[in-house]
Amino acid sequence: MAAASEAAVAGPQFVVGPGEMRRELLAARAAGRRIGFVPTMGALHAGHVSLIDRAAAECDDVAVSVFVNPTQFGPEEDFARYPRNLEADLARLAGHGVRWVFAPSVEAVYPQAHATRIVVAGPALGFEGDLRPGHFTGVATVVCWLFQAVPAHAAYFGAKDWQQTRVVSRMVADLGLPVEVIVCPTEREPDGLALSSRNTYLSPADRQRAVALSQALAEAAGLWLTGAEITPIESAMRATMESAGIGVDYAAVVDSESLGPVTTGAAVALVAGRLGTTRLIDNRLLPPRGAISR
């Protein structure tokens, strides 16, 4: 692998235009450099930094995008109040080997005549796909656009948004996009709560109750290892969340790739719940085991 670029050492280059971003990366690729890409919506926390550090360890240069994508938010969701602080994000990136920060405008991503969307099915069905109609169409559309503007060798995503990682991986495979999707482990607070930009919405009382999501997943993993059937595991997860006063959207154990019924492959436990006006999701991968029943 080539030595770290002088630009990354001096500080990241801030890029707004997609044409400039693409030219920069194509020039770096032509010079034999391996490029890693971390797409984000900003409000960067230690989870994002862990993705960036992984990319920096495995690649010669790293690009990070900061773009709050309006098309993945529903009309009643938190697009307007989603945390935005680009200055703080840039400060957080210092010292992590980032060569480029790409922050396109909404108009650059969705010009006035924009008329194309990526429609996804398969792992996009159910769970977030049902509860947030159009969400994964927005995700797939913007990620596909970003992959054209930021032609990296590898793109890094966090496992916390497990369904999203499956949707993106499926889109990349189906469309033959020349990028490797790398999914990295979820970063957590010491008490187990998954790091999320939306954690900043939580009141102190809701923050204490929120740990029940990871506790429900830990309970699911324990029951799974004892050979428990899926329906009792799901009921136990739901009960743990409800006992903490969390409004449960779902608590399910499904195939980790298709998100359909588990047969004999690896599984994933998925949870989503509401604390006041804040909605959080989390998951935990479960190892393969023998024949499964509900």
Image: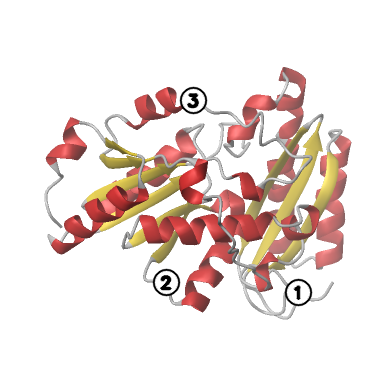
Q: In this view, does 213 lie above or below 267?
A: above
Residue 76 in the figure: left or right of residue 152: right
Q: How crowded is mark 1: few (under 14 residues within 10 Å), some or many (20 or more)?
A: some
Q: Which residue is drawn at 72% across and 74% down?
A: 262
Instruction: Determine contact: label 3, label 1, CB under 8 Å.
Output: no
Q: Residue type at mark 2: give it.
A: Leu
Q: Residue at x 68, y 71 (%)?
A: 121
Of labels 3 and 2, earlier in sequence is 3
Foreground disc of the pair 3, 1: 3
Residue under numbered circle 1: 261
Secondary structure at badge 1 equals loop
Q: Residue type at mark 1: give it.
A: Pro
Residue 188 or residue 3, whichever sits in front: 3
Residue 241 visible to an observer of this rendering: yes
Q: Residue type at mark 3: give it.
A: Asn
Q: In this view, does 238 lie above or below 167?
A: above
Residue 69 or residue 290, whichever sits in front: 69
Asked where in the image residue 165 lies, by quadrant, the reply is bottom right
Secondary structure at badge 3 equals loop
